[in-house]
Image: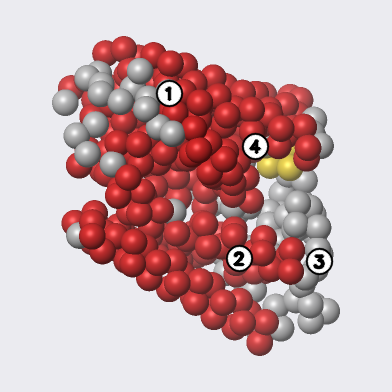
Amino acid sequence: MGMTIGWLLAALLITLLLVRGAIGYAYRLGMLDQPGQRRSHRMPTPRGGGIGIVVAMLACLGGEWWFAPKMLWTPSLMAGLLGALALVALTGWWDDHRSLPVLPRLATQLLAVLGFSLALLATGLSFWWLPLLLAGGAWSINLHNFMDGIDGLLAQQAIFVAGGLAWLAWTAAEPTLALAAATLAAATLGFWCYNRPPARIFMGDVGSGSIGLLIFAFSAMLWRLRHDLLWPALILSSAFVVDASLTLLTRMWRGRRWYAAHREHLYQWLVRRGRSHAGVGAAYLAWNLLVAAPLAWLACSHLRLALPITMAAYLAAAILWLALKRRCLRRDLFKDGHVAT
């Protein structure tokens, strides 16, 4: 127990110190997000603070694997995870300094996910799982990037999901994976202290992409241990998955450039309607605590019903998403009566 607390405190403190330094670094280099039509903030704000989370995770994951008891984690799997994290973080860090085109960014993400996925398959999984792992990893990285648009929202979600994954791994008798997920929660808490409304620094692609990769990786490892635990893990992420997925599908259906910057996610609509960043974050937190967490616990406790419980959770989230968007439209959320592209 003492060692566990030590790793969590180390992750928290490393992130706190590095994010503080990243604020000064961003101001010196002019690495600031400027307000604009597709932005939800009003003042120039530093970006790239997610580097603190990345360094904390790179430092702590290796140490935890070495010292903590382990079952699933092999040297090759650890190397695949750390290599993938470093590659995604490096690409995001570069993009935070100088914008990268979509295709090179996506190719690098797929390469990182491929490395981790091959290491996971080497633990005894069929090669036919590779396309699904590649799609899931790339989507998780970009999903969390899409949802990083207002103060504190992604950090809050990552703390919740990582904490839930830690609990699921503990129930599966995998203490090293549980500690790794808890470490992500602790590191993200350190960043949240600077990112809570009003944010002093933004996460940037270096942080959002890395968090997306780690949540995917920990969920995939949990699924590798026990396939049925994938369902409660998916329930934990239901708020973000539904918002990002339905927004993307809506843009594709309307013929818009789905990969272009926009403000059509539900959380962005709510902010433009007059809700504060803290208020919107509280709404997502309410879903997580009042719906996602109880249903994830229910699915974990009744694994034979886990799939229908997961489907019910996502159906409820989709209905709520549609209802809130229709309500925003009825109240003339957009100036011209249509969604800006």
Query: Does dot 3 land on a helix, a strand or a loop?
Result: loop
Q: Which residue is mark 3?
A: 255
In front of the other: 103 or 145: 103
The correct choice, above or below, for 188 with respect to 311 in the image is above
User: What kind of residue is marked 1?
Assistant: Ala
Nearest-to-viewer mark from 1 and 3 = 1
Residue 257 in picture, x, y percent from top left: 81, 58
Residues tagged 2 and 3 counted as in contact (Cβ below 8 A): no
In space, the residues marked 2 and 4 are separated at their CA atoms by 22 Å
Residue at horizontal 77 percent and vertical 32 percent from the top: 104
Nearest-to-viewer mark from 2 and 1 = 1
Q: Which mark is residue 246?
A: 2
Query: Does dot 2 land on a helix, a strand or a loop?
Result: helix
Q: Which residue is mark 4?
A: 205
Query: Does dot 4 land on a helix, a strand or a loop?
Result: helix
Q: Determine if residue 24 is in view.
A: no
Residue 108 in picture, x, y percent from top left: 68, 29
In space, the residues marked 1 and 3 are separated at their CA atoms by 40 Å
In space, the residues marked 2 and 1 are separated at their CA atoms by 34 Å
Label 4 or label 3, whichever comes before in sequence order: 4
Nearest-to-viewer mark from 1 and 4 = 1
In front of the other: 92 or 170: 170
Q: Which mark is residue 122?
A: 1
User: What kind of residue is marked 2?
Assistant: Leu
Label 2 or label 1, whichever comes before in sequence order: 1
Q: Is residue 260 left or right of residue 274?
A: right
Residue 50 in picture, x, y percent from top left: 56, 33
User: What kind of residue is marked 4?
Assistant: Asp
Nearest-to-viewer mark from 4 and 3 = 3
Residues tagged 1 and 4 counted as in contact (Cβ below 8 A): no
